Amino acid sequence: MHRIGSYQLFVMIVMFHIGSTPLFQLGSQARQDSWIAVLIGAAGGAFVMAVFVALQRRKPEAGLVELLRLTVGRWPAVFFGLLYAAFFAYQSMRNVRDFGELTSLSLLQNSPKWIIMGIIVLIAWYTVMNGNEAFFRTTQLLFIIVLGSYFLMGMVVLAMGLPDTRMLRPVLEHGPLPVFRAALPDIFSFPFTQGVIFLVFWKYAANRQAVRRTAYWGYATGAVFIILMNALIVSVLGPLSTVSALPYLEVVQLVKVANFVERLDVVVTLLLFTGLYIKLTAFYFGAAIVIRELFSIPYAWGAAFIGVIIYASSFAERNNTVHLWIGFGVSLRVSLVMQVGIPVALLLLALVRIRGTERRRGGSTATEGKAG
Amino acid sequence: MRLRREWCHKICCTLLLGVLSIAATGCSGRTELNEISIVSASGIDWKDGKWIISYQLVLPQAISSHGMGGGAHGAAPVNVFSTSGDSIRGAISKSSYEMSRRLYFPQNQIIVVSERAAKHGLTSLFDAYLRNPDSRETVNIFLTKESAREVLEHLIPLEEIPGAAIARMIVNEENNGSTLPNMSMYRTMLELLGPTKTTGIPALEISGDDPLDSTRKTAKTYSSSKIKLTKLGLIQDGKLIGWLTHDQSYGVMWIRGEIRQSTVWFSCDVKHPAEKAVIKIHHMKAKRKAIKTGDGWKLQVRIAARGTLLEYPCEADLSQPQSVAALERQAADKIALLAQNGFKAVQEQKADIVGFGDAIRLQYPRQWSAITKRWNERLLPEATMETDVDVVLERTGMSTDSFRKMQSKAGGS
Amino acid sequence: MEQGGIERVFGKKKTKPYGQMPKQAGGKPEPLSPGIADNLRMLRDKLGNSSDFIIRTIRSDAMPGVEMAVAYIKGIVEEDAIHRDVIEPIMSWAAPPGQSSWIETLRQRVVTTGASGRTAMVEDALNRLLDGQCLIFTNGFREAVTADTSGGEQRSVSEPNTQTVIRGPQYSFTENISTNIGLLRRIIRTADFRMRSYTIGRRTRTTVAVLYMHHIADPAVVQEMEQRIKEIDIDGILESNYIEEFISDQTYTPFPTMMNTERPDTAASAMLDGQIIILVDGSPFCLIGPATFFHFFRSAEDNYQRFDISSFLRLLRYGAFVVSVLLPSLFIAITTFHQEMLPTPLLISLAAQREGIPFPALVEALLMELTFEVLREAGVRMPRAIGPAISIVGALVLGQSAVQAGLVSPAMVIVVSFTAISNFVTPQISMASASRLIRFTLMLLAGLLGIFGIMAGVLFLMIHMTGLRSFGVPYMAPFAPVYRQTWPDMLVRQPWWARVFRLVAVSGVNPHRQRGRKPRHQKG
């Protein structure tokens, strides 16, 4: 696997956390204070990101599987590794299903979903086969396109004078309690702590010392962007934002400039497409790498196997409502454990068990550092 | 070796044929342009317990100069038909009984709702709009006292597609006259979900006796009848509850601060009250503040407007600042009067569309949540409004003294 | 690592051959015999009694009893050189036989051509004969002296046919590799100009030369390229494309990974950027590698015109490439799946045009595209006399009449024509051909799934391109991975005094071209 540069890592962290979330409205229970709820969720997620970074700094050349092996031992590592592989595959499956549902909703109402989901799984498989350089570089290219699209849309929406700050007021109308209830645990576990996947990728970084800085900057950029978009959606749509299935699409549908620039929903579809693609490929890739590191089977076989599982299981849910219900119910609880609980436990174990390679001073620890 | 090549050949041919035939037969949602009929305006009516939906379909060949076989200049550019059903979307799906093509709604420009349908209630209409991906929320919504279908059948001189023309008409009105607001579906829904759950929708009317429903009639130099924007219909909780006249609606627009460009006329000389001076307002701002007075509420409106003089029949000397200040005061008085009339009308109809409730909500959120339900019925009629208008006359136009004054100077006596 | 250094990744897998080893011609190497008649007979037999094999026996008065013969193949030698530099000196040479170093003296003192050598093996002698050298046999000696008299009728240096410029040098490579190397040497006159030649092809024995600039080109890449060339095992090399297909990094890709040009100035400019030139005898087109995606949009003329207009034209080229790949598919997708994207007047106009057209939009587009491809092929092979007629046929018949007959809509004709014209804007034909193939695939995808299909196709292409490498250089450098120093150079053309860096993507060895200071006297 090739090395990943700091800029590529930064771009990936930003794009991964953004994903497709600016298109929805997180924290809609808090109504016009949803952006505050997102802010709180992001702040919480920052602490969890610190946990991930600390784990990485403990032993920079170790990926997730290595860390598990070093902290809990070989056989429990297999168990937890499989758990994580399944979890990543499940997250990927959720994104695939999301992809199918949202494309059917907005773009291709009459096309069968299996074709849509099949195509995106095929593309993800092709990416995984081409290795991490293809994935990270493609994300770099997509970053430019996505940034440009959001910027363009933002400019147009602002130029039309659609946002109305009165929709955001009065701030904290019903007190801070609904805001906190909206933020934790929902926003906290999606999307702000999903960065656990990066524990798998960080070992391929070219500049391991810079990972901490890159991770924080990337996370901060992504979080700020999501908060801004959330505020924008509420200021344009007001109470309608809670009702709509794709609020940003609604916003874009209202754009009408110079009597011919209108009906730009395809831009939204593009953003959806790229955001979901990046997320689902990242999870797919993570699962494939974990499987390869756990059992030494050829990479191509592992990747194909996981791909088939993801595609097949994406049909398991009956309809969109069930999909969303599971997503906001069971899945959130599970995510909390896998994304926050286990990493925190791992960090505590790692602080004890892994000899730090970063230690330079201190009496007894100095000898440990040299031996480690 | 040869056998394998033959096999390969067969498989590839079959695959290729399969791919091409899928591409050609149109599975998965492909619709050619000649399989859709474009709806440019739709109308909603309610009769005998059923929804009647009317559609104004565009005939591309009659409009575009590219029509194959020559655009038939005698043909009307649009065609109207209606379907009825128990629900709105149900009625629309019945259109396949009469139409050879699929109705295509995303280019729909306006939707006209008849008074009867509005009195019955529009909640199902709004839900249908929100839920369906192919109906856009930027459609302009209008009311009408007659049947919606008649409005759709009416052609507009100078314009090709009547639906688009009416949409442009309301935009023109909002930008230049600002008497009636440009209500899109999205804005209507937003206001109905707002604090006072009330909104106002402009109404269309056909004036004249002989409606322009064929191109023969548009071939004359004058039109026997026209579509006009008339009143403002008040909708509360999805139902029509009353009307405001032009002037009252104008006053309401002043309070809301939604005047873009408008003309205000007032008498400048008490001796000749019939002679009116006219000012064009091109910039205004209105700030609303809610003040609690004992048990009731008072709305304090601060209006700042800037304008230029368009017409001046009196004889004051406009190079003197005092005359200009006097004019400004007279204009401010007229505006305050308009605003008060509008407010009184809103009070009578018990429909708060001036943003009073919103102001209370922003300043006293806790009290607002207590009085929300009683606001329109009980508290609004007892409220008062206080206006503070400041008009700045920026320029007096291209001439200084009025023509009348020059006449009286020149003639000698 | 990606930033700073360039990571070289060369595939190292061993692959299985498809077919069998070709039959070799003959076994052990044979030496020449001392008898002159035997040698000549052997050579004549091996050449199959070819009538252009000329043998000239020489008897000199000054050396009675000495039998000598000059053998050459007519047509590939410069006969004047043979008369003047070989036969005449021999005839006026007076030296006694029996000297131990007869062959050496003959070679060094008598033969007056520039290059001369000696040979003792039949195979070698035959090869030299076929290379255009002439053999000088002396009865009684096992060795023959060879003199380089190759020549014959060649095309002279003329204007380039394909890559013409308005301002700039107006000569192109020819089919003779020595001439070509000479043309390059005249441009680059330093000793860092390095060259190595190989003979490739069992039966054609074509000379292939690898040229690079020492201290600028990456030695690892040069070595890899030479290794790949040495591994080529083929019957015959006729054109540089044969070499290109052998040494490319990836076979199954529509994108070219090596540029080709017939202009010496382009080749020299590439060498100065750290790229490596491969010249093949018999073809005026040389190969330039490694090449990234953005190299294919640079034209020679960019450097000869002012930087502002060149920048504009370069950006235009990128735009035209995107148009030529995406326009028909976008048109199909929008008019069949996403009609709501069009403004109403445009939609009505298009709807009016489509009334009465029998085919679906996808079929219509494919028909028009295929017709245009046929027209294009016909235009290439058309004899010059009938050339103008084809343009009339194309324009009137296919454009005007097809529309009026109601077979295609005018909008589709516009789309297809504009696409075709944009296709010609790409300077390198290999990239333009890639865009033609991609265009068809995207059209099919658009017809099946609308804009979603296009997005899926474009994403797939992006993944493919970012994973592609050209001699170890990532194809999408300097964008992915990022080399920020060369961004301006890839997108626009900086003024010459500002071009500090060579294209770092290609060679990290010597990235600074110049100091990069604005001229003292220039204002603004």
Image (tube, rainbow, N blue to C red):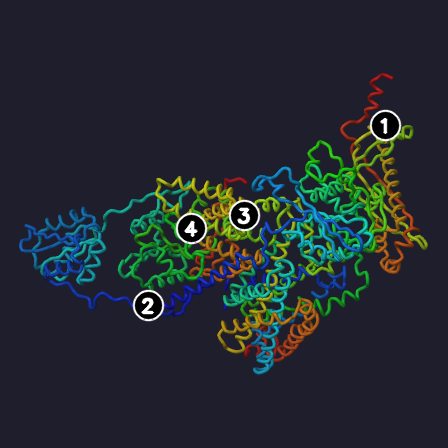
> Mark 3 — on which chain does it sit?
C
- Per the model, the C-alpha gap separating discs 2 and 4 is 32 Å
Q: Which residue is mark 4?
A: C429
Identify residue type, mark 3.
Ile
Identify residue type, mark 4.
Ile
The spot of residue C380 in percent (x, y) is 38, 46
Do tags 4 and 3 sit on the same chain? Answer: yes
- Per the model, the C-alpha gap separating discs 4 and 3 is 34 Å
Please tell me how crowded label 4 is: few (under 14), some (14-19), or many (20+) other residues with Cα within 10 Å.
some
Q: Which residue is mark 2?
A: C19
Q: Is residue C23 among what the camera can see?
A: yes
- CB atoms at circles 1 and 2 under 8 Å apart? no
The spot of residue C217 in percent (x, y) is 40, 57
Q: Nearer the viewer, mark 3 or mark 2?
A: 3
Q: Nearer the viewer, mark 2 or mark 4?
A: 2
Please tell me how crowded label 3 is: few (under 14), some (14-19), or many (20+) other residues with Cα within 10 Å.
some
Do tags 2 and 4 sit on the same chain? Answer: yes
